[in-house]
Amino acid sequence: MHLHKLAIGMTVGFILSMVTGSVEAKEIKIKGSFSGSFSPSEFDFNQDGQKASLNLVTGSSTLGPFTGQGQSEYTLPLPAPVTCPSDTVEFQLMGSNSVQTFTLTGDQLLGFSSSGTLCANFATGTFTFQQTGNIFGGTGRLTGASGTAQSKGTGLIHVCDPAGRCFGNQTGTFTGTIILP
């Protein structure tokens, strides 16, 4: 009878540990680097006539190699730089959606940023940027992902049309925390 109670206790303990383990969220620290290009698109987050740029990148991260696609829309330039150097034009991020696809697994990570700055020096064609955003989903092993991420980088404007829509290249790094259910 004593062994029977021990076996029942062990079974209940095992089931409780399985249930408890499945409820606890798992945090994954991620960091990486990327490079790619950007070009004008027709996407307009807030229908204000200011169009977004299409960003196409490839990179490596602690989760493996990836490709990334995104749409980033900035406000009209500020009258004077607030956080950018005085020899640049400052743009505030209106919104940026992104999809990272990890090439070894096909898993995807989805993100949205609504905070960031782009500092462009049109005399040299160079710019810097930084964004902070949220992870709001994923596929495969990243299904149900949430969390936060920050990115920063530099780039070079190759050409702009009369409407101010530009094409160029960019490189950068990112860090973040992915929370899995």
Image: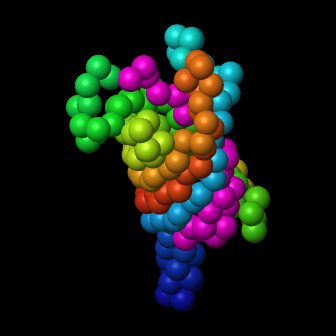
Residue 66 is at least partly visible in this image: yes
Does residue 2 lie above or below 63 as drawn?
below
Residue at 59% x, 57% y: name it.
Answer: 35
Residue 58 in the figure: left or right of residue 76: right
Quadrant position of the C terminus in the picture: bottom right
Q: Which residues are magenta?
A: 51-77
Residue 80 in the figure: left or right of residue 37: left
Q: In the image shown, does 43 or 111 lie closer to the viewer?
A: 43
Residue at 52% x, 28% y: name it.
Answer: 73
Main SS type for the magenta part?
strand
Residue at the far top: name it: 48
Residue at the far bottom: name it: 3
Residue at 54% x, 42% y: name it.
Answer: 157
Residue 53 is at least partly visible in this image: no
Q: In the image shown, does 116 or 119 lie closer to the viewer?
A: 119
Q: Percent position (x, y) of residue 87?
A: 29, 38
Does residue 83 lie above or below 33 as drawn?
above
Q: Quadrant of residue 141?
A: bottom right
Q: Percent position (x, y) of residue 175?
A: 43, 59
Report if residue 71 lies within the magenta region.
yes
Q: Quadrant of residue 120?
A: top left
Q: In the image shown, does 92 or 98 lie closer to the viewer?
A: 92
Q: Percent position (x, y) of residue 136?
A: 54, 41
Residue at 50% x, 49% y: name it.
Answer: 155
Report if residue 42 lies within the magenta region.
no
